[in-house]
Amino acid sequence: MSLTFGTLLSRRATQRARTFGAALIWASACAHAQQAPVTLDAALQAATDRSTAIQAAQASVSASSEAAVKAGQLPEPALSAGVDNLPINGPQGFTIGQNELTMRRVGIEQEWVSGAKRRLRSALADEVVGRERAGYLGQLANVRQQTADAWLNAIYVKQAVSLQQALLEQMNHELAATQASYRGAKATAADVVQAKAILAQTQDQLLKATQTFQTALITLSRWTAAPVADVAGEPPAPESYVSTLAPEELRRVQPTLVAAQRDIDVADADRAAASSDRTPNWTWNVSYLQGGGNSRFASIGVRIPLPVNRKNIEDRDVAEKAELATKARLMYEDVLRQVQTDIRIETSTLASGRERIANLTRSLLPASGQRVELASAAYKAGTGSLADTFAARRAQIDAQLQVLDLKREVSQTWAQLEYQVVPQTMTPAQ
């Protein structure tokens, strides 16, 4: 039993309806909103402007800046009032103004913190502000990394959808081709059934790719904080300058290293402030007293803490801060090693990925293209089958998708390397 292409032509509407159904699902991902396609730069800008994590980090910097202003001030004075020598028995018990010894008192107390101590406390507060700025840089770098990763994923998935769509259209065209197009060639029923099976698989792959694209757009929208209908543009070349940064420069622009250095600065300032607290603060007080009759008095005094156990209190505090400073320095060295290791690994992965892409482009893609040409020629000559042609085209698309997926992985590795540092133009004012 054989089935001519003239018979297949009658089923053309059904095949096209399936094609259009898949295409409509893909188009709906771009038609549900009216925004223009989002480029990588636009996505990064939107994410930076709208990120609540970045805004929270900015609020933390502002909060610590307010605390820094307070750190260098004297403590607020205290108002004191009371009654001294109040009788509690006899005819004058619990009365004021009848006994000459009873004094009504009002006064002011002020704890005095030396200028040197206040400067050290201000320095500590300023270092805390610096540490919060480092936290801001960390959030900024993370948002940019995640946004770039999401955009790259979306743009490559979009390209995969385009490949699947083009393949499906080509298959439908060949399946519905007229009898004259192939000089009266005929196909067996088994051949057509097998070709339809490959076509159905391709339709399913398109639907799957379309859903993946929709998911990628939703993921990108999480970072841009606005619905993304489509993406546009070419992925940047996977060449990163981060691996060429000198260690001194890397310490200034890599947020993890900046934060680790700020921890050292805070620990050192805290130790210095703790050392100054070995000398106690004096508290001065001035009081005005009014006794019975017309007697008036003034009282002036000072309260001085006595560090009788300095060895186990103040000195222990200084020792604690010194150990924390040592910890911060050791942690910085560990963070530095990890950052440098990550950069080397990502740089090596990037170079290997570029080499693999070039190799597949030179070998796999031409070979899959030649297979399609041979299968098409055999089919037109009557020595091959339509199913073989479809299988060759499917294999060609699979090869292209393999290269595309590799490009996506390489680009995302590039993004993790490139955006782990923050440009100096984006750092907060010091």
Image (cartoon, rainbow, N blue to C red):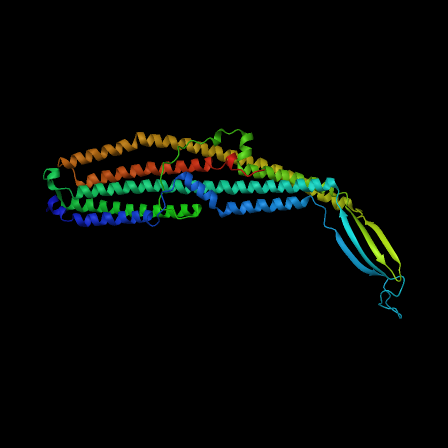
Is residue 375 toward the left or the right of residue 316 in the image? Answer: left
Q: Quadrant of residue 125?
A: top right
In the foreground, 91 or 392: 91
Residue shown at 49%/42% (left/top)? Answer: 142
* Badge count: 0
| Residue 4 visible in this rendered orientation of the protein | no
Q: Quadrant of residue 90?
A: bottom right
Residue shown at 19%/42% (left/top)? Answer: 173
In the foreground, 252 or 313: 252
Question: Considering the image in quadrants, where does the C terminus appear?
Answer: top right
Residue shown at 74%/51% (left/top)? Answer: 77
Task: List x then y, in percent, for residue 83.
Answer: 82, 61
In the foreground, 354 or 80: 80
Task: List x then y, in percent, for residue 80.
Answer: 78, 56
Is residue 190 toward the left or the right of residue 345 in the image? Answer: left
Task: List x then y, in percent, for residue 289.
Answer: 84, 57
Is residue 319 toward the left or the right of residue 210 in the image? Answer: right
Task: Determine the residue located farthest toward the front in the rendered image.
Answer: 294
Q: Is residue 84 above or below residue 160?
A: below
In the foreground, 294 or 166: 294
Is residue 118 toward the left or the right of residue 101 in the image? Answer: left
| Residue 35 visible in this rendered orientation of the protein | yes
Task: List x then y, in percent, for residue 63.
Answer: 60, 47
